[in-house]
Amino acid sequence: MASSQLSKNSISAFEEYGVQMRKPPSVVVISSTGPPHKPVYTAVAKLGEEEVCREEGLSKHEARIRAAERALQMLTVEDPTSSTDPDSSDPSVVMGKGEETVSNPIPDKDPVSALMEFSQASNQIVTFNLIRQEGPPHMPVFTMSVTLGNETYPEVKGSSAKKTKKEAACVVLQDLIKKGLLQRKFKISTPAGAQAPVQQTKIKLGIPGKNPVSILNEYAQKISKKLTFEYTQDGPPHRPKFKIVAVLDEERFPEVSAMNKKEGNVEAAQLALDVLEERGDYLPPKAILGKVMKNSASVMIPPHEMELHDRVATVTMTKLAELLLQTPEALVGRKVVAAIVMTDNNNNLSRVVSLGTGNRCVHGNKITEDGTVLHDSHAEILAKRGFKRYLYALLVHDPLCLLNKGEDEKFRFKPHITFHLYISVAPCGDGALFVPSDGTSGNGCRGDEHNPIFNKPQTQALMRAKQENGEGTVPIMVDEVGQTYDGIVHGGRLRIMSCSDKICMWNVVGLQGALLSQVFQPIYLKSITCGDLFNPGHLSRALCCRIDLKREPLSRSLPPGYRVNHPDFGVPKIQTTRGVEKARSYCMNWTMGDSEPEITDGSTGLTLKSIGKPEGPSRLCKRKLLWYHRSIISDKSTTMKTYKMYKLDADDYNLAKEAFRQRMMEQNYGSWIRMPQEMERFTG
């Protein structure tokens, strides 16, 4: 919205917007809760029949004002006032009005056939998604999108299914031509102004839009060194693979793999810039630093010169600042932040591979049996689910050659690659509960030097659960009765294991989860960095040491490759503050390779509904992860196999998981609360 509108009464501004968009606006109070002397009103802002948002207030007027203000903030994401066409307010939707709007970039070939040929040649699955059909039978409007590999392209609208399908294919083909991926196959020329193939790699350093090879070459000239690229080639002549290394005089940088030399040069140059920037030998222009590293701490100290926990915190907060530049901060807020950071110890290079923000769980009446809802949207859990997406992507394309295969035919990361967890505040449950009374500590502890605190044996080390609409966590008894789907849907309080308990189990079964354990050896955290409420005694007890208390080490009864992992714990010396504003249910997730963060509503477990962005399944939901698994690993013909069946195939993982749960029960720490069985019977 224009700034002049924001200065008006928010309800009036929202109504003006609705009139301009030709969608009848309304801001009405729909319910009230609480005692009669202190009611809380809920108001909803709508455009036509489409709900934009809802907010609460202590009076009807306050609730309506807050709903209108929130709606205006959400509408600023799109800035639709630049057009009077209602459909033009959504840049992710292309309104098909004939070949003039979405033209076929390959005129002598049917666009759907051309896209299918490219799909087969590139080994990427193509799917045409019919999003919805609207309008009367005599004048329907179809909305369709295309998913190619892991990327879903903008939606297209048309008056017939066949025509809309072709126009959706044209959108993909036009993008592929801009990336230079179709020219050789279909013998077409690159249009003026289009991207060259090398520019599909994102530039995270230097000047935006400038080729990393040019940046590195300018740097080499500046320090009077010669830049060269060394190549080795393998694979068949019709589909070669190149291994490329950037060399500055005699210094060789990490090797990358690519399908062609141009793409490989870009990746090799970018990686060399990453290494130089980490060492402090290369710094981007100050103007760029000011943009990319907004709100991050200690940006003038190269991360490789920092201690481990400072380095992990710094790269996390830097990545968070980058993501917030792409997202209205009003949709995210300052809440719990968690990230999984990968460190290449050969090059002192650290980077975030997955990140999440949030501290909410889904409402019980929102759970489903089809795997489309995120049940737990706490930051640590979102970061771990994003890490699984990263592993699936790595199975498809491993440009830095990070993986090796063992004798068991399972993948493992090379020894110089380690993973670290950053959390802005101690995880809920046993890890955070006792810190306020005992105080925090600035001392860290290494994996084999833990000194867990057990000064309250009756209450410490117990497994605990988050409760729907509850504050904090509650202990779970050993004989706790399991949850049922009907019970939760009809009003029972949904309970989900605390983050402390989940991380504790990760330190036995690994981060990869059940499905990926069939192709990966267990992946363990090297360290855990906690920004606030840090007490090494409580953390070490909650996240690993309580497993073996006064008993034979659990590792002796685990399957080969599994163990009880004791990560290093520490707190960063740099200041990483978290806000104290009223927590909202909005959450954010990002995985390396994503073009932008995804915003979800933790209370519904779905993507955030806003103008032009319908509510729907998150890319982190179980159904989507099952799709990755089928597409990349398993037999695609097993369409009747349920998600639960795939999990049951992970024999060693299930043995380790059950051993952990049994150990916790034996030590009277409680039983693990499982989600209802109906929620894992979907087939995708």
Image (cartoon, grey):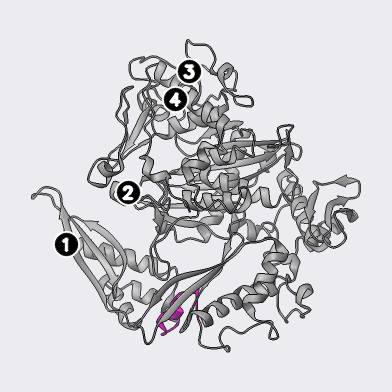
Instruction: Specify the segment rendered in magenta.
Output: 83-95
Q: Residues within 10 Å of mark 1 (few under 14, many from 20)?
A: many
Mark seen at residue 582: 2
Local packing at callout 2 (Cα closer than 10 Å; few below 14, some 14-19, many 20+) is few
Mark closer to the chain start, 1 or 4: 1
Q: Is residue 93 magenta?
A: yes
Q: Looking at the image, is 399 positioned above or below residue 106? A: above
> Camera-side residue: 146 or 678?
678
Q: Which mark is residue 60?
A: 1
Between marks 4 and 3 in the image, the one whose residue lies nearer the viewer: 4
Q: Which residue is mark 3?
A: 452
Q: Are marks 4 and 2 in contact (CB under 8 Å)?
A: no
Q: Can residue 285 be seen?
A: yes
Residue 614 lies, in percent from the top left, at: 40, 66
Residue 364 is situated, as x and y percent measured from the top left of the image, at 29, 46
Q: Amino acid at mark 2?
A: Lys
